[in-house]
Image: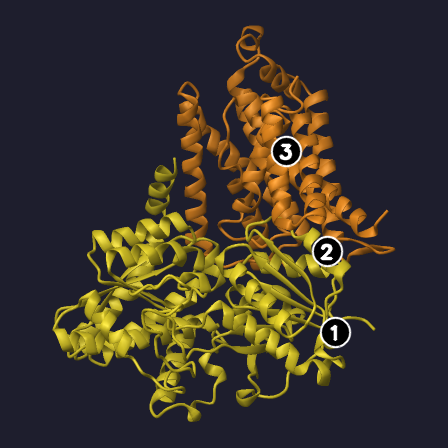
Amino acid sequence: MPNASATTRRGLLQAGAAGALAATVPATARAQQSGPARGEPLRVGVMTDLSGPFAGAGSQPLFWGAEVAIELFNERGGVDGRPVQAVTADSQSRTETAINEAERLLGQERLEVITGIYSSAHAVPLAQRFEQARKVMWITSAISVAVLKVRNLRYVFRPTVHSDQYGEASVSFVHEHAQARLGMPPERVRLAAIYEDGPYGTGVAAAIEAQARSRNMPLVLKEGYSASAPDLSTLVTKLRRERPDVVLHTGYNPDITLFLRQAKAGGLRFRALIGHGAGHAQIDRLTETFGNDVNHIYNVDPVGTQMLDWSKLRPGVGDLARVFVERYQAKHRVRDLPAHASMGFNNTWVFLEHVLKPSVRRTGGLSADALREAALEVDIPVGGTIQGYGVKFVPPGNPMSGQNERSFPVVMQFEGGRGRVVWPTAIAGGPPVLPLPPSSPFALRS
Amino acid sequence: MDPFLLEALVNGVLLGGVFALPVLGLNLVFGVVDVIWLCYAELVMVGMYAVWFLHTQAGWPLALAFAACLPVVAALGVALHLLVVRPLLGAPPINQVLATGGVLFVLQGGATLVFSTDFRSLGVEMPPMEVGEVFVSGTKLAAFVAALFGAAALWAFLKFTYVGTAIRAIARDREVMPLMGVDPRRSYLVTSAIGGTLAGFAACLLVVQLDVHPFVGLSFGPITFIICVMGGLGNMLGGFLAAFLMGILVSVGGFWWNTEMSYVVAFAFFIVVMFLRPRGLFAR
């Protein structure tokens, strides 16, 4: 039955997948014709969720960001004239499909590296498979600490932020502003962590719990739920009973919209709502659904590059960011790029420019071992990427080997469908609006 | 009584009302045609898209969009019967299940191609009702009342009309009734249209509570099937009562333990029911 279903779906979605493929392949073809990249293509896997619930929760912009990176890389000559050819796969928001597609890319397509991987639920089992196959897995999105922690993986690299950093950022943000903006000492701020119950949500929630404990802040409710649950009204009831000041939510979609809708209908009030990536990063979609009701909610994520002061980045990086943002906006007609678009572009660009290029130049070909060596040599200082962070991977033999030790998230706040950085204070675009103003339907009434 | 527990109980009843309509439609089709429409939740999804499109894109008043949704999904139910189910009526049950399962992916894939994977919202909400410390969602309450109305209308149709009586007779004994002048082919067709109409009705109630996307059926489809089996496949009243039982189990279980455990509790109860009453809790 599952096999039959998968085959049928694949057939049915052929046109859609072809569209997604076409979006990349013609770009390569254009580059081969018009740009200097004319040699034998370098084939790189790109696996994201182009269908299923994850597609609308950030995986689609993640792919589009990677697409722009490959397009631009080829236009700039690829690797000494050799263009990158993306071999795409749609993991359909299902772990078993992600595993099957990875097997196809590694086995039939004989790829040495696969980039992308939106969901931690996919990344956790896939990481072991890549390690066994000795092929490179370059994670551009999946954040769960469980992907890498204490597994001593040698072929898995994650340039982006991990879940422990999400928990640290949100709790630090609340701790830092409690007295001045909430008028109470941090030890009296009541926190509640709600999360989807996959590796992503549980990872962030565990980090929040650890951070709250270390700062002596009360965590009055910590509760998981299935992202496909048809109803979250009981969770809303329990939150009302526990009266949290700050709700820390980690979810995909549509669970986030379901929660917000039922929270409003259920009379839930709080002083702040902090999301942690995925569905909370899709502010265009949330604004389309809720209008001004989602004003002043927060999201923790690697920063969307458009929120940074590009003049403060390393030379040339700001120009790269500008080209990316202009192309993405022109292509997809969005006002404010979701963080996943920047993640897709940035982490793919780091791979192409700082791993693939030196590796191919050194060996003349494409091999996982050479890519791995090049990855371990990457040394980009802070300010050297369009998302502000640097890149230096933790070497093998360490508990977090393969993790970028220079990555960091920020806390963003949204208003009118646009975001701005409010933490860390050093790069903030102004103070946060905290607590929620009375105009918000979620604001606590005194 | 703890007002929050009371609120959880009320939420459970309202949730049961949401489950009830698709359960009735699915049970009706199975009881009469003896085929499980594995794609039932996807018919609901098509109905949700129809309402969303007509209201937000074509600018139709919501009531008109609701009214148009019913015949659209009813026609889909008829098409499903004529094109997929009828040719397989004499085939082994597994073939029928696989065929309607295939339609599930056709509808999901079609919706992805036409509407993309974006989440669509109707943007309609009703103010909540506040009684003491208990909050009741106005939208869910309205959907619950409408579901009860739909169930009552279905009961009246089956009880008091000639066609309804024929349908019930076919459901009771599909071998003998043709010998007594009941045309099973016509009954199957009418049943499929009613099954589709109920899916359309469920779509109208769900589209004000959930975002529409091609995979929205995953949110309520599996639990709908479980409720049908728990109440007794083909047993309308059993399914209807089981929907409320499941709603209360999920809601109160989530309140006492946690939201994840609520489904564990509900499914554990389902397994126990299957051991004790394999034909369903309310099987005659």
The quarter of the image holding the C terminus of chain B is: top right
Estimate the spatial distance between the alpha carbons at disc 1 and disc 2, rounded to whole Å: 19 Å
The subunit letter for the residue under badge 2 reads A
Q: Which chain is yellow?
A: A
Q: Quadrant of residue A196?
A: bottom right
- Pinpoint residue A244: horizontal percent, then vertical percent: 72, 66
Q: Is disc 1 surrounded by few (<14), some (14 to 19) or many (20+) residues within 10 Å? A: some
Relative to A293, B94 lies left or right:
left
Q: Is disc 2 surrounded by few (<14), some (14 to 19) or many (20+) residues within 10 Å? A: many
Amino acid type, residue under disc 2 in the picture: Lys
The subunit letter for the residue under badge 3 reads B
Estimate the spatial distance between the alpha carbons at disc 1 and disc 3, rounded to whole Å: 40 Å
- CB within 8 Å, label 2 to label 3: no
- Pinpoint residue B125: horizontal percent, then vertical percent: 70, 57
The subunit letter for the residue under badge 1 reads A
Of the residues under marks 1 and 2, which one precedes in the sequence? 1
Amino acid type, residue under disc 1 in the picture: Arg
Q: Which chain is orange?
A: B
Tag 1 residue: A188
- Pinpoint residue A121: horizontal percent, then vertical percent: 44, 55
Residue drawn at the location 29% of the way across and 58% of the way down: A130
Tag 3 residue: B269
When the figure is inspected, residue A209 is found, relative to residue B219, above or below; the finding is below
The numbered mark at residue B126 is none
Amino acid type, residue under disc 3 in the picture: Phe
Tag 2 residue: A238
Q: Secondary structure at mark 3?
A: helix
